[in-house]
Image (tube, rainbow, N blue to C red):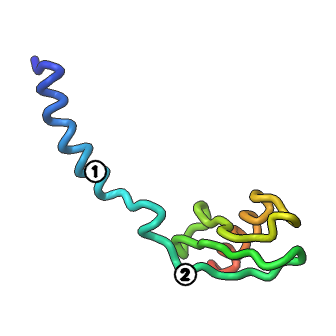
């Protein structure tokens, strides 16, 4: 029977290798885009062209809209670019 230390010795390199394979959002960023909305211009950071999960606003008129509202415009833009 293996000891916990032996198991950890085997699992740690495997986990490290798997972690290196997972991209971070920064690796998938596209050039930011500006979206004209009724409340002003929202600058969006879009990520993968086949998903909109990470798409978010990086600049927006904070006196006219909330962060969730600005992010929603960015997700809409990501969806629009999918089509």
Is 38 drawn above or below residue 27 in the view shown?
below
Of 66 and 62, nearer the camera is 62
Q: Residue at x 70, y 82 (%)?
A: 34
In the displayed structure, does residue 2 sit left or right of residue 19?
Answer: left
Residue 81 in picture, x, y percent from top left: 64, 81
**Residue 31, labelled with which disc?**
2
Q: Quadrant of the C terminus?
A: bottom right
Q: Nearer the viewer, residue 50 or 24?
A: 24
Q: Earlier in the sequence, mark 2 or mark 1?
A: 1
In percent of width and height, residue 32 lies at 60, 79
Residue plotted at (31% across, 51% down):
19
Give coordinates of residue 8: x percent, y percent: 19, 30
Label 1: which secondary element: helix
The residue labelled by disc 1 is 18
Of helix, strand and loop, which one carries label 2?
Answer: loop
Tell me how many marks there are: 2
Assess whether mark 1 and mark 2 are in contact (beta carbons under 8 angstroms): no
The spot of residue 69 in percent (x, y) is 80, 62
**Residue 14 placement: quadrant:** top left
Q: Residues within 10 Å of mark 2 (few under 14, many from 20)?
A: few
Quadrant assignment for the N terminus: top left
Say few, some or many: other residues with alpha carbon within 10 Å of mark 1 (under 14 / 14 to 19 / 20 or more).
few
Alpha carbons under labels 2 and 1: distance apart: 28 Å
Closer to the eye: label 2 or 1: 2
Query: Where 24 falls versus 43 (above or below)?
Result: above
For the point 74% across and 75% down, which residue is it? Answer: 42
Answer with the quarter of the image where residue 51 lies: bottom right
Image check: 42 left or right of 7? Answer: right
Which residue extends farthest front?
A: 63
């Amino acid at each position: 029977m293996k000891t916990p230390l032996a198991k950890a010795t085997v699992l740690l390199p495997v986990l490290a290798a798997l972690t290196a394979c997972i991209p971070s959002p920064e690796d998938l960023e596209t050039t930011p885009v500006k979206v004209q909305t009724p409340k002003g211009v929202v600058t969006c950071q879009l990520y993968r062209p086949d998903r909109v999960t990470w798409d978010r606003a990086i600049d927006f008129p904070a006196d006219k809209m909330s962060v969730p509202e600005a992010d929603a415009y960015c997700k809409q833009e990501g969806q629009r670019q999918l089509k």
